[in-house]
Image (cartoon, rainbow, N blue to C red):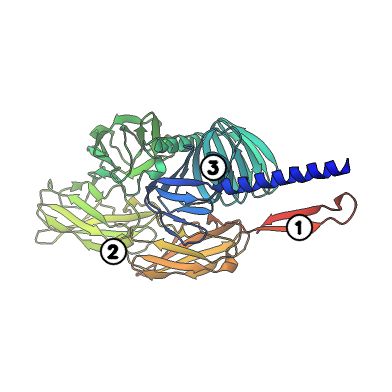
Amino acid sequence: MLKKTVVICVLVLLGVLSLGQKTQQDKKDISAYIVKVIRDVNMKSPTTGWQKAIPLSKLKSGYEVQTDKGSLAMILFADQSKLILREKSIVTIKGEVQGKEILSRSVHMDRGNMIFNVKKAETEQFRFSSPISVASIRGTEGGYNTGSNADLFTIASGLAEFTNSISGRSTSVSTGNTGVADSTGDLKVRKANKKELDNIASGSALGGGQTPSTRTVAVSGSINFDPSPSAGNTTTAKLDLSQTDTVISSVNFFYRTKGATSFTQGAMTLENNIASFEIPAAKVESPALEYYFAINIGSRTLMLPTGGAGSPGSVTVSKAVSSATSGVATITATPAFSPSPIRSFINIQSTLDLSSVAPKLNTVTLKYRRSGDAAFKSLALTLSNNVATGTVPGIDVRSPAVEYYFIIKLADSLNTEVPLPSDGPSNPISLTVPPLTRITPDFGPLKSKSPGSVSVNFSSLQANVTAVSLFYRKQDEPTFTELILTPSGQVATGQIPAAKVRYPRLEYYTSLRFDDGSTVIIPQDGPSNPMVTSVQSIQRELRIPGQTGSLQKKVVVLKWNE
């Protein structure tokens, strides 16, 4: 009896080993393709450095994909499951297949925002992870966003399991809900908001070959009002979307006078992805117009600015001003400035139409200053057919406002000077200028305890930048460290020491110095309310053999991130 048992065990063992060898031979790395690339997308394998990704670049297990600012990538698997990586995202793809069967598949996101549409499988689950959380899904559409201290996991369709890796707590997230996991170990589920669901819907549209989301619509510098709005005169609102990879059905324009409660809607004319709408003269009233655009993409609508009616854009509406100089006929004119809306550190063109003025004119001077300065600067305007024009340099166009008035010198025997408006020197006109926000650092992959690269591109500024500094600190540090970046052309670069790059995040703000000696902080409240970026953790593991009692012959495994 003993001999039979031994023979059977040996035969069974040989069979298992044989099966194991065959299974091992059949297993291979999972593969996927980058099928769409917008702007700057990079990829690397476990054995090579970063290189530019192009459409149909092949990915295998262990490959990483990175999207830069304003960029996007779409990844397609063999079962038609799709991942859409938004800007400033880094993911690592892993998995195995056996024949046509997917044995395992996972995507680790160090930082960023990802939209997914995963096809349903009988057994295999798609696994997403970050330094904070893990999500297991099957046949689900949604979005996954990992930030500096919290992850958001939204389900548009389906059901998924969501786990906080720090505390081990798990919960189910169903259609229309968002799971929130944070670095304290907390885990909760709430109803998804409109912005989260719109983000997923627009990403799905891109995956279907339609149009991308608001993140792929370039609005910086593409909104314009021509001519510059002045009270009681028509102006045309224009939205230039010609540089975007989109197919736009239509665009609606919503506007109101600042202080009004309701918006007026108008259908914009759309030609070559440039939308325009003429605002009637009666609707152009001082002090400003508030507005937003509704971009219709198939059955979906995207708002620009993204806050829509709740957070509209604003453009100054100038009004006629008059002089009141004794013994001189009253002069009335409406100042105009372009481009409109005004942007920080961009040259602005000043125009003063005096064609209706009876007295002969000699010169026109624009007196202006930055808000808060004591003295005015003088800009001699060019006078042609009684229309005075000149350019205010970008270095002087900064938040919160440019204050100004005009001095009109008449061509009479006394060279009479007429201030416009009459109380201009003591009560100048204010032209609102928004804060500088469009200059933001671009970080390379930030991994805990490794040096991190950073660059700042300031080419959009029409002012001479002489120095750029990044002020940074590890989370919970009381003070910032200054890193003086090295300029080359219109880009400044530098490297953050490994000792300062620590999980889970890096806090920072930027400082620009100009050739007039002035300094601008971005964001303005950076020292008290800095920007943040995620830092990938190093996963540590300690195995401790059990010593007594029920732990004998077992191993206690301790895991943590640092």
Q: Name the element at disc 3.
A: strand
Relative side of 176 to 415, left or right: right
Pinpoint residue 173: horizontal percent, then vertical percent.
61, 34
Q: 463 or 92: nearer the eye?
A: 92
The residue carrying pointer 2 sits among few (fewer than 14), some (14 to 19) or many (20 or more) residues within 10 Å by Cα, namely: few
Q: 322 or 462: nearer the eye?
A: 462
The residue carrying pointer 1 sits among few (fewer than 14), some (14 to 19) or many (20 or more) residues within 10 Å by Cα, namely: few
Relative side of 204 to 235, left or right: right
Pinpoint residue 394: horizontal percent, then vertical percent.
30, 60
Q: Tell me the residue that label 3 is attached to.
A: 144
Q: Earlier in the sequence, mark 3 or mark 1?
A: 3
- Quadrant in which the C terminus is drawn: bottom right
| Picture quadrant of residue 393 | bottom left
Residue 95 at least partly seen: no
Q: Amino acid at mark 1?
A: Arg
Which residue shows up at 30% across the image and 32% down it?
A: 250
Which residue shows up at 22% across the image and 50% down it?
A: 324
Q: Amino acid at mark 2?
A: Lys
Q: 352 or 164: nearer the eye?
A: 164
Contact check, label 2 and label 3, Cβ < 8 Å: no
Q: Name the element at disc 1.
A: strand
Q: Which mark is residue 543?
A: 1
Q: Amino acid at mark 3?
A: Tyr
Q: Name the element at disc 2.
A: strand
